[in-house]
Amino acid sequence: MKKVAAAFLAISLLATTPVFAAEQESDPIQQEEGMIEQGENQELTVDEIMAQKGMKSALESFYDKFPQAKTYEISGTIIKNEGTSRLKLFIISETESFILDFDQERITNYTQINKIPDVELEGPMIQGILNKIYSLLPEAKDLKRDSSFTQIDNGGKKTYILSFSEDKGLEQSEISSKGLMIHFDETGKIITFDFDSMPLINLKGETKEEKAYELLKQFYGDEAKEYKIKRVNEISENDPNYKDHKDFMRGTIVFTHTSSKEKPILVGFNSEDELTMLQVTTQDFLKE
């Protein structure tokens, strides 16, 4: 399965046009992996982490709020990018993890990540979402669930992420295969729907734009009537990245809501004009 991060990279390529600049929201695990892979970064030992000015006091305050995390493994990386640096902490156990930003002697932001309990996975909200997905992607029923977790930011906002792929064995683990990732909020509203090597069915329409709007109707019901196509963006065939991304993200159809308070929605398509993903993005995506 292609990594979800690759889809976000392809979207960012579309932002190189003078029409707009893109700034994507993605799940924190994918974001941090991407950031750490870039530039010259420095991994810290536990002693080096604790030697940072203000660290002991900051962690004590954090552990007061999450006392169970005192026993978790801690690691840290100084992320250097374009002349700036910041410290990212990872506090991890088998069932729960935290990603923390440390700056100016304090923890400025954190995300709590938990595995979804089996009883919740079998509950009506998640099963209802999966049934809707399976009606559009019947082949997804045969996929194996790779991961399922919730993420809660320090503002209390909770979202869910499920990912699935083919169970092809270790010897074929590097081979691109069918895959699916679903990201949704506490109400069941889809934030990201990303899939690979499977055709969508049961979508009315002849053009990619018509089918994209039908996909919005499937996920958002009557609310889809409030969305209109703002523009269609494509990676130019002359772009050096075109060859690597055309099979799953040659372009995006940008939908905007009649209310400026609502975030835009992107629907991706490949070189065959087949839909490949849907994602709620930020208003910054529309800025020039």
Image (cartoon, helix red, strand yellow):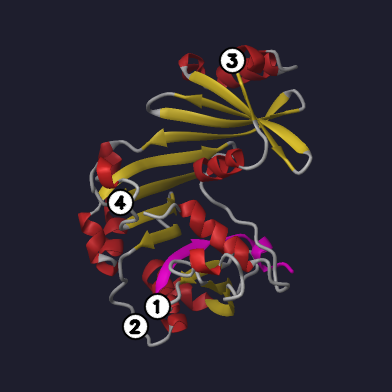
The amino acid sitting under disc 2 is Lys
What is the crowding at mark 4: few (fewer than 14 residues within 10 Å), some, or many (at least 20)?
many
Write down the residue under mark 4: 165
The amino acid sitting under disc 3 is Val
Give whichever of 279, 74 is nearer the camera: 74
The amino acid sitting under disc 1 is Glu
Helix, strand or loop at label 3? It is helix
Write down the residue under mark 2: 204
Q: Earlier in the sequence, mark 1 or mark 3?
A: 3
Cα distance, mark 1 to mark 4? 25 Å
Query: Which numbered dot is residue 214?
Result: 1
Query: Up-down: is 22 above or below 253?
Result: above
Disc 1 to disc 4: CB gap under 8 Å: no
The residue shown at (57%, 63%) is 11
The amino acid sitting under disc 4 is Ser
Query: Up-down: is 188 above or below 238?
Result: above
Cα distance, mark 2 to mark 3? 56 Å
What is the crowding at mark 2: few (fewer than 14 residues within 10 Å), some, or many (at least 20)?
few
Query: Which numbered dot is residue 46?
Result: 3
Helix, strand or loop at label 4? It is strand
